[in-house]
Amino acid sequence: MLRSLPPLANGRLRRRDRKAHPHLFRLRRKFERVSRRVERRSWLRRHRGALVYLLLLGAAIGWIGWNLYPAAMHWPIGTAFLHLAAAPDCHAARAVGLAPALRGNPGYHPRHDRDNDGIACEPWPPLRSRPRTRLRTTDEMENASGFAGDLSDRR
């Protein structure tokens, strides 16, 4: 059963009332703990979008820094950003104007060099795989065809 309590000064619970109302202090402490927990959860719910955004922003900055740092040691920052933009594939390297790229130059990534010859994103088929032909002189052409006349008359 409820027993009557001594009156509170101004209707508020104060430290000096601790001995007179110990159960009210325990109840108040429990209420404050629950209130803090609820406030913390609601704060997380309200700011969840911003926290996820900050987490993703931090991950993106970390990824860019991790990939850009080695390139930034060798080239100016603008060239380093172009080198990073050329990383996904050869289409991206051509789009930023860094293809074909030689080993050690901006735009060269080992995964873009299929035949491991030091040239990344080379045109296909490679130009050097074509047979090299030398232009023949008119004398060589005459000797090869057996025609000794004027070549301008020929069709």
Image (cartoon, helix red, strand yellow):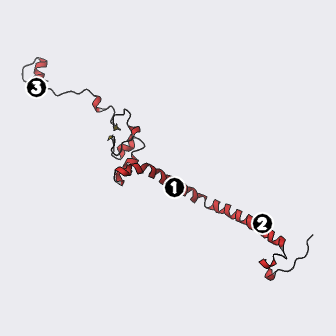
Q: Is residue 147 above or below residue 17?
A: above
Residue at the extreme left of the image, as rendered: 149
Q: How many residues crowd mark 1 within 10 Å: few (<14), some (14–19), many (20+)?
A: few
- Quadrant of res 47: bottom right
Q: Earlier in the sequence, mark 3 or mark 1?
A: 1
Where residue 33 appears, x then y in whole percent? 74, 65
Residue plotted at (77% across, 68% down): 29
44 relative position to 137: left or right? right
Q: Earlier in the sequence, mark 2 or mark 3?
A: 2
Residue at the extreme top of the image, as rendered: 146
Pointer 3 residue: 138
Q: Secondary structure at mark 3?
A: helix
131 relative position to 72: left or right? left
Amino acid at circle 1: Gly
Q: How many residues crowd mark 2 within 10 Å: few (<14), some (14–19), many (20+)?
A: few
Where residue 5 appears, x then y in whole percent? 88, 77
Gap between marks 3 and 1 measured at Cα: 69 Å
Disc ID at residue 30: 2
Q: Nearer the viewer, residue 109 or 45?
A: 109
Q: Is residue 126 visible?
A: yes
Pointer 1 residue: 58
Q: Is residue 151 above or below residue 15?
A: above
Q: Which is closer to the viewer, label 3 or label 1?
A: 1
Residue plotted at (31% across, 32% down): 126
Q: How many residues crowd mark 3 within 10 Å: few (<14), some (14–19), many (20+)?
A: few
Residue plotted at (35% across, 47% down): 96
